[in-house]
Image: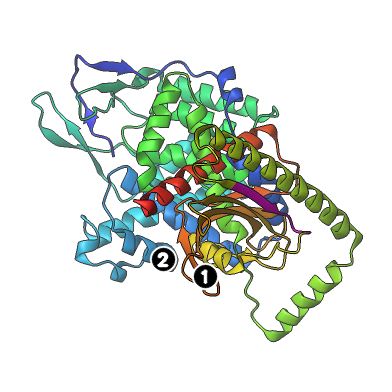
Amino acid sequence: MNKEVIYMSEKNISIWKPIEFKETWLETNTSSFDELADSWFEKRKDFNEGNKEYHDFLNKLKRQHAIETGIIEKLYNLSEGITQTLIKEGFVESFISHDDTNIPANQLIGYLNSHFEAMDFVFDMVKNNRPLTKSFILELHQLILKHQDYTVGINSLEETVKIKLLKGKFKERPNNPRRDDGTIYEYCSPIHVESEIDNLIKIYNEIEKKEIHPLVIAGWFHHAFTQIHPFQDGNGRIARLLTSLILIKYQLFPLNILRNEKSIYINALEKADSGFPNDLIKFFSNIQRRNIESALNIQKQPESLKEVASIFKEKVESLTKKQKIEREKIITLNRNLLFKEVYKIIGELQSELFLTIPQEKAYIKAISKKPSDKEYFYYTNQIIEYANNQNYFFNKNLPRGWSRLSFFISKEKRYDIVISIHHFGYFDSVVAIGSFIEFIDKSYNRSNIIEQSIPLNVKHYTLSLEKEITERTKENLKDYFSDIIKVGLSIIINELS
């Protein structure tokens, strides 16, 4: 909830410019999303209208959206512990204790329920294929403010005052928020709001007819709406709801921005204000990637033995279908190409290390094993532990392989940075790349070798095998492996200190 500033300042920055769609949006990087998108759209076919697990998953996302959007807008504070309870169990007032939040529990539940209703309204609009209109935006605004009657402003005497809210109406006077450093950000003036919203919807309808990436459409719309800032209060909440609507239309997920991502979000919006929207699109891509990974880990829970037997029968029968065999050939081909690229990158990074670390100082050896090699199953326990820590399902029944960079401290001691490529979640075309360190010491007794696994605090990297990896993904992979080695070597250095 921004404070409405009703006086002028010498430090004014004009944010609003007449709305238009510029070519710079078409040059943004969506690869973080694209790397998983094909597998998601394939998996999405399994989630029909009545799928309970997927329905529950979406409801949790809606509850998360309702909670986090209010925290971002400073409507309330809410502890992380009770946040997870409310996401999982629903908005129940009795779950909330005095220390969990800074506002009365009944007021908090009112905010959350109205926002959840607004998100349901968005889903219903998509389901009924309703067009985006100005009247819908006003109706959505009235809905989210159902339990909020006032906003906070600062008068000419620097006093904080309560201002009665306009619900379901555009602003009637400037609402230019002031940052802590005194800077005032000037948005669209009230006199231009109606025409700019009309223009926003017109351009949105035009670009939707073109073959433009859905994240680019959503990102552009979100940024343009925030520049207009058409309401007295609630602009951020409405922007995220309308952006969610666009994403849901493309079978994607709501724009769930978490509280610890607020600074990334604001910085990305400010870069877009200056004509550089890439960070905003990358941020939106990462949010979709996070939700896709969660969706790919949804496991159907049969309700009876008969249903279990029926599912098992379908699985066995599907193994013989020609279409499945052809698809498996494509996945196998793309998996082999991925292994080949990974091995190439590991070799390049080894060569780069040799430029700084002469072999006589610390011998470095690279080795890789693909699914057809007999050692492919090494590190199974380590991968299980890694996947559990990263909160995803590791499918042991599908092909996997690994690469290893060994750093020999002496003839008897070495540290191995292990990079595993294995299948992720309950779908056959997604792989995860994870990493950990193994310490091997043979100096005491060769019949009693000391081995120790050391965790690497590097998040897994997921990829779809529905299509061959792109050049941009190859660049992303090299950056990812460089980070793994950098973190791994830092840990090894600390171990040696």
Hey, what amino acid is under mark 2? Gly
Q: Residues within 10 Å of mark 1 (few under 14, many from 20)?
A: few
Dominant secondary structure, magenta: strand
Residue 416: which quarter of the image?
bottom right
Q: Residue drawn 66% across and 63% down? A: 426
Quadrant showing the N terminus: top left
Report which residue position mark 1 lands on. Answer: 449
Element under disc 2: loop
Q: Is residue 397 left or right of residue 28?
A: right
Percent of width and height locating residue 410: 49, 53
Q: Is residue 59 left or right of residue 191?
A: right
Q: Is residue 454 visible?
A: yes
Percent of width and height locating residue 342: 67, 44
Is residue 46 rendered magenta in the image? no
| Front residue (pair 419, 398) | 419
Q: Which of marks 1 and 2 is in front?
A: 1
| Front residue (pair 427, 2) | 427
Please, which residue is most extreme toward the left here? Answer: 157
Label tally:
2
Hey, what amino acid is under mark 1? Ile
Magenta span: 365-372
Report which residue position mark 2 lands on. Answer: 90
Q: Residue drawn 28% across and 58% down? A: 79
Q: How crowded is mark 2: few (under 14 residues within 10 Å), some or many (20 or more)?
A: some
| Front residue (pair 88, 394) | 394
